Every structure is written in structure tokens, then in C-alpha cells.
Image (spheres, grey):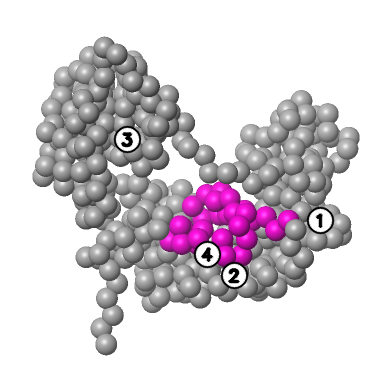
């Protein structure tokens, strides 16, 4: 038996953990640079606030209905997500973190009352982390997804937990689930399915549609069909080392000079190197990405990529930054207006598999310096030690006019109680 644990309106719920006065009030959380709505409380949904709605379009609604607005606080959300993950391991060792707010659990070999056990998991997360969740149980991952939707849709009736454990429940649940709500069926695929009279998840499992599903979706579609039929073919996935790491950002203000761009590119390269060292990897390839303001350029092309292969594998901020800046000098155009840039490291290998070269090798002092930088950042939470090309006074920040404190990851922002 599988279960899907899904945190309700996760970003909003994280903000409410430390501000319980917001319970029962409309709350929204915005994307990077305070752009669009990416999380809404049920109260905000009832007011007609749509997912993905640009913030500037709903400012009148925000004022009119006194909607509480927050910038994305990824440090807080990531930390609470890890705490949920650690808590779930107390109920089963088989846990797959599917996303920041979802996790699949496997209970094979356990003979339990799944509804009761689900309520126990739900109440434990609420008690220890103050985060509301809904849980769906099914004999496959796809069915647990369907069960979770039912638990979330009918929370009063299900108490946030629903178990699909009979053929009658499975059939009823699949007939209730629209084809566009099936896990792995997006907007384009749902249009094709509806054109062939496949309107529900139950229709998707009917035998006479199998040939069409196979021709349209291939083996992925057949596996999904088996999953919805209750045959488990998708196992829990083990955490994998990333195949590449990308740091790309839109600028709060446009950049027009090479010196400004060098500082940003070097900062992105430095963060890539930090992530490499954190997962104990090195890279052989570095990619630079630049994007002009396509509304203010006179030229047809406004996106640029350039890649260079390193002579040796590295996770040094100095090496990766120098390569990125070298590429930048070759493609940057003075006078043009740039809105976005990024650095991507690829061709990753474990650092303990790094091969040494006879004639060309990285300065061994780099690793000593990188360790000092990492230790200082881990201790203080700040990137105070920087490369010379970086601006010591400039902090790499997004537009976050409604940012809440990092209650659980910064000591100086720890929650205070007056008593």
C-alpha cells in the first residue's frame, strides 16, 4: 500500500506557523521578485484569486479584502519541508520526497488500519510542526494521488485521510476524477484524450483505449493505466545526485555594462560551486546564459548560450567563475540592455572519482580556501567571504518587499516570545 502526504497550501501554511493570527484570513505568497501568486489560502481562493495571477493585477483586490501578502521565503519553506520529511520516517523507512510539499510512503509488509494510521500521521505533523496535511492511500502511487485529491476535496467528510482499498472505491474514485486531473496528464494530452471520448480516469483504464494510449504516450501511458488499475509498477525513487546545477536570475534592474554583468555572473558561478561541494560533486562543463530585454533591442537575437569544457573536473568557485567570465567577455555587447543571466554546471562526477592530470591541474590551495568559505557560511549563514570580482557591499537578493523572517535558519531572526 502506498500513501501520498500533501501539505495543504504549503507556503501559506508555513507563514501561518509563526503568525497564527493569519488563520482564517486570506493570504497569498508571491513568486520570485514578487511576480505572481504561487500559493493561496482557502479564503483567498474564495475571493477569486487565481494561481499564477500577476501581483500588479490584483492590487485593488488586496486592498479591498485586506489580503495578507508574503514574498517567497524559501529558507523557511525548505527547512519545514525537511522537518516533515524527517517526521515521516518515524512511520515508515520507505519515503520519497516527491516535491517540497509532497511525499510518497510505502507500507509494504505492514498490516495496519490505514485510515487510523493516516490520522496518526496527520495529527503528528499538525502537533509537532503546525502544518495541515491530507493523506491518500492506494495500492499504487497513481491511486494514492487520486485518494489524496478526494481527501483534500472533502476534508470534513474524510477528516483529511482517504483510503482506496476496495474495487468499488477504486471504480468510484476513477469515475469522479477528470482526465485533466490525472497524474501525468497535462493540458495538451487532456485535449487529445477528450477528443477520443476519454473524459475521466476510469475511461483511461478501459481496454479498448489501450492502443490509442500506447500510440500517444508510449510505455509511460501504459504504466499509468496499470497504476490506475491498482497494479503497482512505479516504485519509490531513491534520492539522486543532480545531473546539472543551474543558477539563473532575472535582474531587479537592467544591466548595461560589462563590469556589472561580471559581478553577477561571478556570483552565480560561486553559488553553483557551493552546490557542487554540498553534494560532493565536480563538473567538467560550464554554460553561460545571457538574455537581453527583447523589447529594447534592435537585433533579432536576444538569448545567448556559450559552453566551455574544463581541462580537469572542479568545484572551485575561482575556476568556475574565471571560465564563466571568460565566456562573458566573448559574447557580451556593450550598450545592450540585459534582463537575465545564469551559470549552469554540467557533466558532473563524484569528487572522489576525480582523475588527476600530469601536465595541467588545479591549484591545491583552492580546496583549502573553499573549505574556509563553506565553514564560515555554515556557521554564520552569510556569504561574507567573496571573490575579488564580486561586490563586497552588494547582496544577491531578489525583490522581496513582503519577506517574513527566516525563523528557523537564522539565529538573529529566531522567534521571540515575551512573557
Q: Bounds of the magenta span?
A: 80-108
The crowding category of the residue bearing disc 3, from other C-alpha atoms within 10 Å (few below 14, some 14 to 19, many at least 20), is many
Please check the rendered image and state whether residue 67 is part of the magenta-colored stretch, yes or no: no
Residue 122's disc is 2
**Camera-nearest label, 2 or 1:** 2
Looking at marks 3 and 1 on the same chain, the residue that comes earlier in the sequence is marked by 1
Crowdedness near tag 1: few (<14), some (14–19) or many (≥20) residues, C-alpha within 10 Å: many
Residues packed near mark 2 inside 10 Å, few (<14), some (14 to 19) or many (20 plus): many
Q: Is residue 10 visible?
A: no
Considering only vertical position in the picture, is 54 above or below 155? above
Q: Position of residue 155 (x, y in %)?
A: 64, 69
Can see residue 30? yes
Q: Is residue 86 magenta?
A: yes
Under circle 2, the secondary element is helix
Residue nearest the viewer, comparing 58 with 220: 220
Q: Earlier in the sequence, mark 3 or mark 4?
A: 4
Image coordinates of residue 131 in percent, x first then y, are 49, 68
Left or right, 251 with respect to 133, comes to left
Indicate the quadrant where residue 248 lies: top left
Closest to the camera, between mark 2 and mark 4, is 4
Q: Secondary structure at mark 4?
A: helix
Residue 369 location (% of width, % of height): 19, 37
The residue positioned 56% from the left and 61% from the top of the image is 89
Q: Secondary structure at mark 3?
A: helix
C-alpha span from label 3 to label 1 = 45 Å
Tags 4 and 1 touching, CB below 8 Å = no
Mark 4 is surrounded, within 10 Å at the Cα level, by few (under 14), some (14 to 19) or many (20 or more) other residues, namely: some
Q: Which mark is residue 170?
A: 1
Q: Nearer the viewer, residue 116 or 178?
A: 116
Q: Are marks 2 and 1 in contact (CB under 8 Å)?
A: no
Q: Which residue is mark 4?
A: 87
Residue 272, disc: 3
Amino acid at each position: 500500500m502506498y500513501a501520498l502526504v500533501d501539505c495543504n497550501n504549503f507556503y501559506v501554511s508555513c507563514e501561518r506557523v509563526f503568525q497564527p493570527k493569519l488563520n482564517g484570513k486570506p493570504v497569498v505568497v508571491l513568486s520570485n521578485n514578487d511576480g505572481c501568486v504561487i500559493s493561496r489560502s482557502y479564503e483567498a481562493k474564495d475571493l477569486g484569486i487565481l494561481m499564477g495571477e500577476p501581483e500588479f493585477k490584483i492590487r485593488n483586490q488586496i486592498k479591498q479584502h485586506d489580503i495578507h501578502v508574503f514574498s517567497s521565503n524559501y529558507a523557511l519553506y525548505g527547512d519545514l519541508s525537511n522537518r516533515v520529511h524527517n517526521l515521516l520516517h518515524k512511520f515508515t523507512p520507505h519515503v520519497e520526497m516527491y516535491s517540497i510539499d509532497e511525499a510518497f510512503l510505502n507500507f509494504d509488509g505492514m498490516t495496519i488500519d490505514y485510515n487510523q494510521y493516516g490520522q496518526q500521521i496527520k495529527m503528528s505533523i499538525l502537533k509537532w510542526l503546525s502544518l495541515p496535511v491530507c493523506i491518500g492511500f492506494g495500492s499504487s502511487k497513481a491511486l494514492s494521488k487520486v485518494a489524496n485529491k478526494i481527501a483534500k476535496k472533502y476534508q470534513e467528510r474524510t477528516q483529511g485521510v482517504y483510503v482506496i482499498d476496495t474495487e468499488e472505491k477504486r471504480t468510484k474514485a476513477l469515475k469522479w476524477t477528470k482526465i485533466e486531473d490525472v497524474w501525468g496528464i497535462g493540458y495538451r494530452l487532456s485535449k487529445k484524450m477528450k477528443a477520443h471520448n476519454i473524459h475521466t480516469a476510469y475511461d483511461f483504464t478501459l481496454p479498448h483505449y489501450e492502443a490509442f494510449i500506447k500510440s500517444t504516450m508510449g510505455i509511460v501511458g501504459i504504466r499509468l493505466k496499470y497504476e490506475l488499475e491498482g497494479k503497482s509498477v512505479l516504485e519509490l525513487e531513491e534520492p539522486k545526485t543532480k545531473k546539472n546545477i543551474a543558477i539563473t536570475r532575472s535582474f531587479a534592474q537592467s544591466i548595461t555594462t560589462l563590469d556589472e554583468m561580471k559581478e553577477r555572473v561571478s556570483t552565480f558561478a560561486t553559488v553553483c560551486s557551493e552546490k557542487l561541494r554540498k553534494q560532493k560533486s565536480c563538473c567538467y562543463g560550464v554554460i553561460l546564459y545571457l538574455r537581453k530585454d527583447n523589447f529594447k533591442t534592435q537585433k533579432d537575437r536576444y538569448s545567448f548560450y556559450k559552453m566551455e569544457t574544463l581541462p580537469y573536473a572542479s568545484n572551485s568557485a575561482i575556476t568556475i567563475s574565471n571560465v564563466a567570465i571568460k565566456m562573458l567577455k566573448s559574447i557580451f555587447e556593450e550598450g545592450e540592455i540585459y534582463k537575465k543571466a545564469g551559470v549552469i554546471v554540467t557533466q558532473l562526477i563524484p569528487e572522489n572519482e576525480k582523475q588527476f592530470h600530469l601536465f595541467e591541474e588545479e591549484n591545491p590551495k583552492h580546496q583549502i580556501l573553499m573549505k574556509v568559505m563553506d565553514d564560515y557560511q555554515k556557521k554564520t549563514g552569510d556569504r561574507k567571504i567573496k571573490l575579488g570580482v564580486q561586490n563586497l557591499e552588494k547582496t544577491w537578493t531578489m525583490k522581496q518587499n513582503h519577506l517574513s523572517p527566516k525563523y528557523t535558519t537564522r539565529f538573529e531572526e529566531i522567534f521571540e516570545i515575551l512573557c
